[in-house]
Amino acid sequence: MSVIPVSWYLVLSAILFGLGVVAFVFKRNVITIFMSIELMLNAVNLAFVAFARAHNQLDGLVFVFFVIVVAAAEAAVGLAIVIMLAQHRQSLSVERENLLKF
Amino acid sequence: MPILDHLWIILALPLAGAAINGLFGKRWPQSAVNSVAVGSVTLAFLAVAELVREFTLLAPDQIPYVGRYFTWMVAGPFKVDFSLQVDQLTVVMLLTVSFVGMLIHIYSTGYMAHEGGYYRFFSYLNLFMFFMLTLVMAANLIVMFVGWEGVGLCSYLLIGFWFLKKSAADAGKKAFITTRVGDFGFTVGVLLVFATFGSIDFSAIFKAVAANPISEVTLTTICILLFTGAIGKSAQLPLYVWLPDAMEGPTPVSALIHAATMVTAGVYMVARMNPLFSRAPIAMLVVAIVGAVTAFYSATIGLVQTDIKKVLAYSTVSQLGYMFLACGVGSYAAGIFHLMTHAFFKGLLFLAAGSVIHAMGGEQDMMKMGGLRSKIPITYWTMFIATLAIAGIPGFAGFFSKDEILEAAKSGPNANLILWVLGVAGAALTSFYMFRLVFLTFFGKPRYDEHHIHVHESPKNMTIPLVILAIFSIFGGWFAAPKLIGGIDYFEKFLAPVFSMYAPPMAEPAHVLAESTASPEMELLTALTGVPVIVAVLGLLVAWWLYIKSPETPKRWAQSLRGLYLLLLNKYYVDEIYAALFVRPLLWLSTNVLWHGVDEGVIDGVVNGSARVARASGGQLRRLQSGNTRSYASWVLIGAIGFSVLLIALYVKVVH
């Protein structure tokens, strides 16, 4: 079995990250935006893992674990916010959450 | 030698008095303020008396005696010590200032008894004594300058003592600003002295000028600059305008500051710097001309003034002119002598005028007085004696000093007959306007409402200083009297070391002596010696004729010589000319250019403009904070892309 070059992983990671970004910017639903953030995080994780394996080093893997832990914490807090938002506004659209401005 | 070793005591006493009264006097009764104020000045006078006793014991080579207390400032070669000195000139000034000052303090306790701000008045008066004594005891130009400016400050404070009165507040400002014009010249002169001689200590300067000849141009410039300061301080042409207005202050202030002491500071300074002046003949001529012209000029204004204090003010300007005339013709001793006798009789005149005003309940217009002779006899007699003294009637103090000045102008080392004529004419006018003042005030019928104004003699604490000063106005001139009968002039002999120690070598002293005996010109000059006395008596007679014998004549003359009369009454319109030439253009410039242009346009413009820029840009930038999550996300994205592009660009640049 031939080894898949690291660049393929990077291309995949970039595609996933790009999809996340596009979804983050264009979607209106809070939960979808939340998911797009997760997608970007995991795209980065994929790049880390690929590099860690290519260079035979553990640093990238350790970093990935940190990202997963932080993402879990973020999901806990973020989903709580989303629930509160839904209760208050009866809506999940970010278009209507524009009170924090001048 | 307790005082000689501690010269600072003389200064510390009135300063302490000023501080104590200024800080605590507000809550104290008048008697407590009195004892602090009068006590401190009396102690200062006693200290001066003791100083004089110790001074007479000094060997000639110990004079001037210098007390160095601390180094005040050092900047490269520029070094200023706080040092005081005593020589014969200082002794004369110290005695005059502290003695007259003490009497006027005593007088003020009566005069100011019913005034508000009693403690404040005495605090200022004591402060004035401190600065005046500093001025005369200073051993270098900078310490002298401290006293010089300090007395100006106190003058300002006391002229504007009744500061709620606009005219008084304005007069204070006028005095301060006008003298400032002269002080500017003085300051530049001091700097030039330092640049030329490398020191500002009197003895060092004098030694330097005596040892190495300095170019006459430099010396003349220095002397004229220093004299500019004297013109301002001593109210000479063309900066005399502040002194008549200074009469807005309480009368004891006019007596002490604007007659007896502060205004003579200029004369003292010129006499002190005599080694420089004596080597600058052109500057000497300027001093003499300014003095003589002022003496005559302000006497003419005095002729028609009706405010009793204004007459005395112009008289003061005129007498100061005589002092400068004396210095200018090289007879510094005569100038200082006149300074001393003038302090007695002019101080007395002002105090007596104050007593008249006090008796009249505040009236200053002589046209509303008259016939006061029998009602206030002590005031009348003392004022009459002072008038005899200032008019130069033989036997009184002013006669000896004025005669000596005119004698010096006529046949002294730098004699000048034109200046002598001006001086004699001024003397005639002086005699006239002074007797006019006395006749209008004390003789004739009362011209005031006798039912409403109850004329009363002043209390003892006012009359006693009058009597003492009257005694000095009679006998104060006798120090110098023997000269007239061919003896040794004690006063001049006493001061001689100050004026001869660094004097330039005389050109041909023998020649002058030889000529004074023979030539017909000299005989003429000798014949003219009696002229000042004759004109003084003439002035008296004319005044008597015009104001007692036929009191209608002055009005007729004023009618027929209306133009001249109005010119004199309005003081040659000098105030109006100055207003048109300096005040109004300056006001216009300040209002339209500096205020509306620079201040409002440039400075406010910069401040308001930067605020407006900040607000306008903020108004635009705040639109970025839309509250829209997706727009923030877009900004983050744009930032991230921009940053990535930058990194890549840098990487590419490094690699290639």
Image (tube, coloured by chain):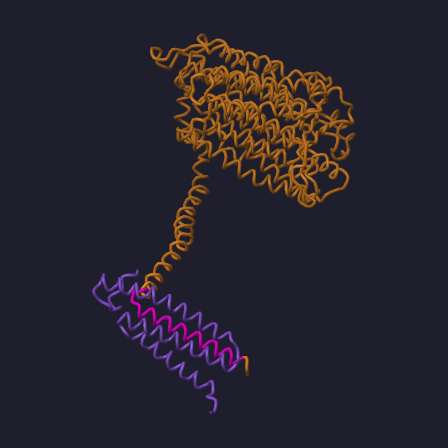
Chain colours: A purple, B orange
- Up-down: is B138 above or below B102? below
Residue B197's image quarter?
top right
Query: Is B645 in the magenta?
Result: yes
Instruction: Tell me residue B498's x, y (percent).
Output: 71, 28
Residue B228 seen in render:
yes
Q: Main secondary structure of the magenta part?
A: helix
Residue drawn at x 48%, y 24% is B120
**Front-most of B8 and B313?**
B8
Q: Position of residue B347 (x, y in %)?
A: 54, 20
Q: Residue furthest front?
A: A1
Image quadrant for the N terminus of chain B? top right
Image coordinates of residue B400 in percent, x first then y, are: 63, 19
- Assess whether residue A56 is covered by the magenta stretch: no
Is residue B27 rendered to the left or right of residue B11? Answer: left
Q: Nearer the viewer, residue B54 or B528?
A: B54
- Which residue appears farthest toward the left when viewing the image? A90
At 44% across and 69% down in the image, what residue appears? A66
**Magenta extent:** B625-653
The picture places residue B35, in percent across and down from the top left corner, at: 53, 16
Q: Is residue B117 above or below residue A21?
A: above
The C terminus of chain B lies in which quarter of the figure? bottom right
